[in-house]
Structure formats: structure tokens, C-alpha cells
Image: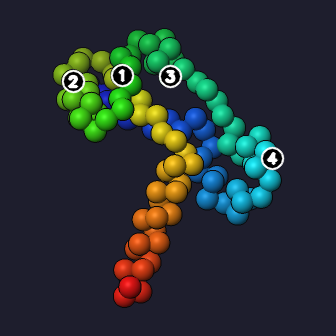
Amino acid sequence: PLVIALVNNNGGSIFRHLPIADGDPELFRRRFLAPRDLDFRKITEAFGAEWRGVETREAFQKEIAAGFGRSGPTVLEIKTDGERSKRERETIWAAARDRLAGG
């Protein structure tokens, strides 16, 4: 068995960490975010694999276990919000900097 965890932020969110992300929002969206709107369920099934969309930690754990019980590959798709993810990471980084600085 093979279980693949696919983190789907609809493409390009890693570029939100570049300085250009703070410039022209429309230019940034068109040139860097590059939304794909791909249907990974159809793509996965076209290759004969199982697809499962998961939204919670519990569902993820359940589907991982189920995937390892199958004879073929399974893709677990976790959809994320790239902007929210960036904000959460910035909050964690700030807290870590404060902690390391003795704050």
C-alpha cells in the first residue's frame, strides 16, 4: 500500500513569503499564486487510485489507517487556505522570536 497526503492550497502560496507579496495584490495573484482549481479526485481516480478528502485530524488518522489496509495507492487531499496558513506561521514565528529573546 501507498498513502499520499496531498496538501492543496490551490497553487503558489509559498510565494506569499516573498517581499513581492506585499506589493500590487492583483499582479501578485496573476503572476505568483497561479490558482489551478484542479480536481484531484478525478486525477487520482484516472490513475486507478483511491481518493479521500479529509477535513479534520480525526478523519486524516482514520483514512491513513484505511489507506494502509488497501492493496493500491490512496491519496488523502487536505485543502488549505494559503493566506490563513501564512498568518498562522507568522504568529508562531513571532512567538518563537519573543521566546528566544527572553520575552
Q: CA distance from mark 4 to mark 1?
A: 34 Å
Q: Quadrant of residue 64?
A: top left
Circle 1 — which element? strand
Q: CA distance from mark 2 to mark 1?
A: 10 Å
Question: Residue visible at 47% across and 72% down?
Answer: 94
Mark sitting earlier along the chain (2/1)? 1
Question: Residue visible at 46% across and 68% down?
Answer: 93
Residue 69, x across and y down, in percent? 19, 22
Mark sitting earlier along the chain (4/3)? 4
Residue 103, x across and y down, in percent? 38, 85
Instruction: Tell me, yes or no, whether the two marked residues, 1 and 3, touch with CB atoms within 8 Å.
Output: no
Q: CA distance from mark 3 to mark 2?
A: 19 Å
Q: Is residue 58 left or right of residue 83?
A: left
Q: Which class describes the residues within 10 Å of circle 4: few (<14), some (14-19), or many (20+)? A: few
Q: Tag 2: residue type?
A: Ala
Q: Is residue 20 above or below residue 48?
A: below
Residue position marked by numbered label 4 in the rendering: 27
Residue position marked by numbered label 3 in the rendering: 40
